[in-house]
Amino acid sequence: MKTTSRLTTRATHLSGFTAMELLVAISVVMVLAGLTMQVMRNGREKAQQVRATQKIKDLGAAFVAYTGENGGLLPRENHSGSGDTWQAASEEAASEVWYNALILNMARKSVGEIGEAGKPQLFYEDGYPLFVPGAPYPKSEKKLENPMFAIGMNSRLQRRDNDTGEKPQGTLASIQAPASTVIFLERGMPKDEKVIRSQANFSASPKAGPKAFAGRHNQKGLLLFADGHVEVKSPRDILTGSGQVKTLEEGSSVVWTRDPDDDPN
């Protein structure tokens, strides 16, 4: 009887130990799987940021070429009065808007040409200059109704003239601090998460102000400056907690207007 008792106790002990081992093994596998998924996610996000950086750099090169070919004139930020539709983009008056003029300079179909051809899906192909990897485009065909921009031109570069009511294009020479002045930025789309709660205008339009700056790469986004270089910044670098644009005096290194002395941030 004693031998049987010892064997039973040993079997019970071994059985309990095996179950414990199994639980530990499962826990280890779950931890490793979580770490692997996080590494893969980080790698994917980094790759998306690298590709997005190259795309906005290419846009910057087209911007420099355009200003050089047009006496220093800046491209227009949007086609006012008709909305940001495929039809509006294909109108003659929109020929100098950046999403037409610069893309043609890159030897690609402009947004207007895409709309005119009735092939809006081309706008959302990975190889198209304005398709931004990592941007939350709708998965449904809703995105085909109108072009949805994940990059926008700085809307503070072209101010409305109080006398004429028009928005002059402005010139590259009028930008007083080209190394600090934003030309293009990753702009917020409806499904982008806001880094600062008070951010606004995540509307996917072709122009954008500081409050619409999207931090879609680990809460940071890309800014293209007038001298052609790109920086990765957080919306917190350019906005206060209440959503106000930081001035140079408040420590910001980013300029949003052509002449910060005459027209501060």
Image: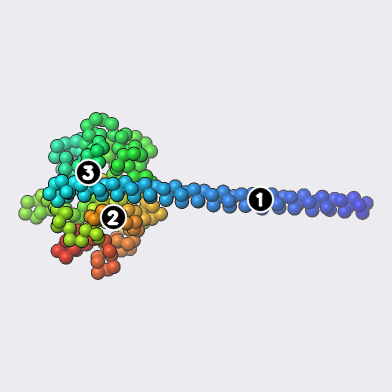
Q: Which amino acid lies under the numbered mark 1 shown in the image of this protein?
A: Ala
Label 3, residues with CA under 10 Å away: few <14, some 14-19, many ≥20: many
Q: CA distance from mark 3 to mark 1?
A: 57 Å
Q: Which amino acid lies under the numbered mark 3 shown in the image of this protein?
A: Leu
Q: In this image, 228 relative to 93: left or right?
A: right
Element on which disc 2 rests: loop
- For image coordinates 20% across by 47% down, the residue present is 65
Element on which disc 1 rests: helix
Q: Which amino acid lies under the numbered mark 2 shown in the image of this protein?
A: His
User: Which of the two labelled residues, at mark 2 and mark 3, occupies the earlier sequence position?
Assistant: 3
Query: Which callout, 3 or 1, points to the residue nearer the camera?
Result: 3
- Image quarter in which the C terminus is found: bottom left
The reply to whether callout 3 and callout 1 are in contact (CB within 8 Å) is no
- For image coordinates 58% across by 52% down, the residue present is 31
Q: Is residue 85 visible in this depiction of the protein?
A: no
> How many callouts does the rendering have?
3
User: Which of the two labelled residues, at mark 2 and mark 1, occupies the earlier sequence position?
Assistant: 1
Residue at mark 1: 25
Give residue 229's mark.
2
